[in-house]
Image (spheres, helix red, strand yellow):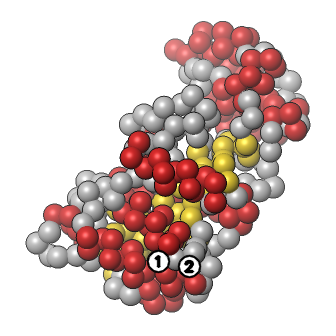
């Protein structure tokens, strides 16, 4: 959808999204107020009282007043987007805590309506991790699962590439605007996915990747997927954040064991001890997903 097609309610939501001095939770407080009162034209001071922290109120007030229709039209440009209230917004993602207000996308949006499974793991992944992807992903593609990951080096890229190589579909969820590619080395893969598959982000154009964006990106991977499969994760790994978020949202978590003495798989082993399914074949995944 383009900005020119937005309803008045969506335009207010988009203005709130671009406004400085307010976080996601504050935005949701204001939006729920609009919905409960059926009045989205409440005063600026009412919005500030509802959702803006005292130390940020001056910034919010100034930003809201400066964001004219012309400015927002310019910011949105030709970006494709969904809001939380769009019919195409993924149903599973609606169910998580603090879901994204907006999703920007390039590619085949119909993939959002397919069954999805996320693959995450080490950026410095081994040949073993690549072989695991090549063992698990082709049968999932045959069962019409779309493979979701985060475009990072290592397991993420292995998962995307395996899906493409086996004539499946894949979704990349990134931690920047869609006019940026991180890491830069993934640009050819990024280009292929946005042309033939789907790239998603909750960040608009001109947003560079920041450290705190990646855990937020991970909640989207966990949120849109029926399950998460972790391949090679150290004890302190972003992949474990994704797995924890999946567990908190009632999704299945699969963990592939590695060598007992390898630091590279300690995170996976801890996940298994905590209740993730020890995964040694694709049947371990398909048996569980049959009940989801």
Q: Is residue 50 visible?
A: no
Horizontal and vertical percent for residue 288? 51, 84
Residue 255 spot, x, y in % from top left: 35, 74
Q: Secondary structure at mark 1?
A: helix
Q: Quadrant of residue 264?
A: bottom left
The residue at the point 68 percent across, 64 percent down is 111
Q: CB under 8 Å between callouts 2 and 1? A: yes
Vertically, is 23 above or below 48? below
Secondary-structure class at tag 2:
helix
Are there few (<14), some (14-19), or many (20+) residues within 10 Å of tag 2?
some
Quarter occupied by residue 214 = top left
Q: Residue at x 73, y 11 (%)?
A: 65
Disc sitting over residue 137 in the figure: 1
* Along the line of sight, the residue nearer the viewer: 171 or 217: 171
Give the residue pinned by disc 2: 141
Q: Is residue 134 left or right of residue 201?
A: left
State the residue at coordinates (62%, 45%): 100
């Amino acid at each position: 959808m383009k900005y020119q097609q937005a309803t008045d309610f969506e335009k207010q939501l988009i203005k709130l999204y671009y406004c400085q001095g307010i976080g996601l939770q504050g935005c949701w407080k204001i939006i729920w107020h609009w919905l409960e009162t059926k009045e989205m034209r409440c005063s600026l001071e009412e919005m500030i009282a509802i959702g803006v922290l005292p130390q940020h109120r001056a910034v919010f007030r100034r930003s809201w007043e400066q964001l004219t229709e012309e400015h927002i039209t310019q910011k949105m440009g030709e970006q494709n987007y969904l809001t939380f209230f769009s019919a195409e917004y993924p149903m599973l993602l609606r169910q998580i805590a603090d879901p994204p207000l907006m999703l920007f996308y390039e590619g085949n949006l119909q993939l959002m309506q397919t069954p999805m499974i996320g693959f995450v793991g080490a950026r410095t992944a081994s040949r073993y991790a690549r072989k695991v992807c090549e063992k698990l992903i082709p049968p999932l593609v045959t069962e019409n699962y779309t493979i979701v990951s985060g475009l990072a080096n290592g397991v993420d890229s292995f998962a995307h590439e395996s899906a493409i190589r086996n004539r499946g579909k894949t979704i990349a969820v990134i931690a920047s605007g869609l006019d940026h590619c991180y890491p830069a080395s993934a640009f050819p893969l990024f280009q292929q996915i946005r042309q033939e598959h789907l790239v998603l982000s909750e960040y608009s154009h001109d947003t560079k990747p920041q450290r705190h964006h990646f855990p937020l990106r991970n909640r989207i991977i966990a949120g849109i997927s029926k399950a998460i499969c972790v391949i090679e994760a150290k004890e302190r790994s972003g992949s474990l954040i994704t797995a924890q978020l999946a567990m908190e949202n009632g999704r299945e978590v699969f963990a592939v064991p590695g060598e007992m003495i390898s630091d590279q798989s300690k995170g996976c082993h801890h996940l298994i001890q905590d209740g993730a399914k020890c995964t040694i074949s694709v049947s371990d995944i398909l048996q569980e997903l049959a009940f989801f």
